[in-house]
Image (cartoon, grey):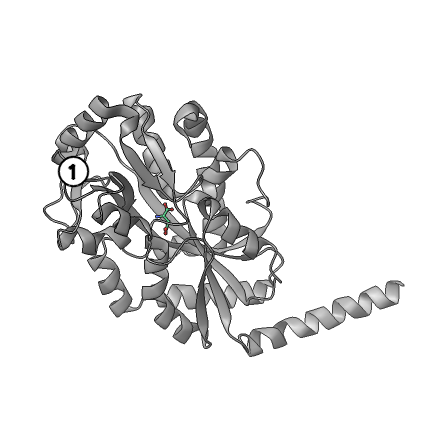
Amino acid sequence: MIRILRRTAMMLALATPALAQTYPSQPVTLIIPFAPGGPTDALSRIMVEPFSRELGGNVVIENVGGAGGTIGANRVATARPDGYTLMLHNIGMATAPTLYRRMPYDTLTAFETIGLVSPVPMTWIGRPDFPANGFAGMLAYIRERGDRVNVAHAGLGSASQLCATLLQAQMRQAVTTVAFRGTGPVFAEVMAGRIDLVCDQTTSTTPYITSGRVKAFAITADARLPSLPDLPTANEQGTPFEVTVWHGMYAPRGTPRVVVDRINAALRATLRDPRLIARMAELGTAPEPEARVTPEAHRAFLEAEIARWRPILTAAGEYAD
Ligand code: ASP
């Protein structure tokens, strides 16, 4: 018995370097746990070409939206840990564990963290005919109309839902929230006037704002962005309100360390690509500093973020839906 175990261990040890040389030998699926057209999808689409090149294989994006990203994340948590199923997800990885009474997976044990990718500010935008201007105007309108104002988000545990929750808690005023499978499908609803407001990352809102197809009220960063120079921060309009959405890449727990390291090396090289950096800047973001693009830094940050958001979201309880 001991001999069999020893032989299995030896075979695994021999197989691991070989795996490092042959990986990837088939297409790699990158799960985006939100609908197409949203910011997580947009980030993945500008990354996929350099990432495929650096990984030396074909990376295929698959959108698995719903339940604030937890359906797509569960697909990854239960996938074979062979490096052929990866995920790009956002800050929702850290908020969902507090928001859901029961999760289909344990965020801290179900995944290998690969590295942090990029921090992205959010913007409050609304329908083109929204009858108020500026962040103060938007807040006054919400105060006056209360739950007759509808605010879209991408489900419990999404970045947009976090942003909507924080605003309601800060105002002590409930609105009516409407959940979508991602914020991608929200833009058509906002432009058609069926949704009043949404808070979404600049990676998807920038083209809508610059072309004037939506009304923009504030950016949730600490300073204006060169890509949206006319959009003032919430802070400079007199109401402090800052949210930054971070993104990270994941693999199922048990993915061999050599494969995790290969993916991490490809991710780090991708984030040094000057064309990608330029495209990111146009959308209001930039790569994380290299020291944060490691499995260890990502895991430590994920743990810290879960701990940071737990008391905030517990206190915001009645607005977290
Ligand atoms: N922005 C979305 C969120 O609220 C996700 C997406 O559609 O990419 O997390």
The residue carrying mark 1 is: 130
Q: Please report the residue visible at 33 percent of the width from the left and 34 percent of the height from the top.
A: 164
What is the residue that sits farthest to the right in this orientation? 1
Q: Please report the residue visible at 33 percent of the width from the left and 52 percent of the height from the top.
A: 185
**Residue 148 lies in quadrant:** top left
Mark 1 C-beta to ligand 1 under 8 Å: no
Percent of width and height locating residue 151? 30, 37
**Residue 37 lies in quadrant:** bottom left
Horizontally, residue 100 falls left or right of residue 149, namely right
Looking at the picture, tell me which residue is in the foreground, 2 or 208: 208
Q: Does dot 1 land on a helix, a strand or a loop?
A: loop
Mark 1 burial class by Cα count in 10 Å: few <14, some 14-19, many 20+: some
Percent of width and height locating residue 35? 40, 55
Q: Please report the residue visible at 38 percent of the width from the left and 68 percent of the height from the top.
A: 48
Q: Is residue 251 above or below residue 128?
A: below
Q: Can residue 241 be seen by looking at this rendering?
A: yes
**Residue 38 lies in quadrant:** bottom left
Q: Can residue 226 be seen by looking at this rendering?
A: no
- Quadrant where the C terminus lies? top left
- Quadrant where the N terminus lies? bottom right
Looking at the picture, tell me which residue is in the foreground, 306 or 319: 319
Q: Is residue 57 above or below residue 134?
A: below
Q: Amino acid at mark 1?
A: Phe
Q: Please report the residue visible at 36 percent of the width from the left and 38 percent of the height from the top.
A: 178
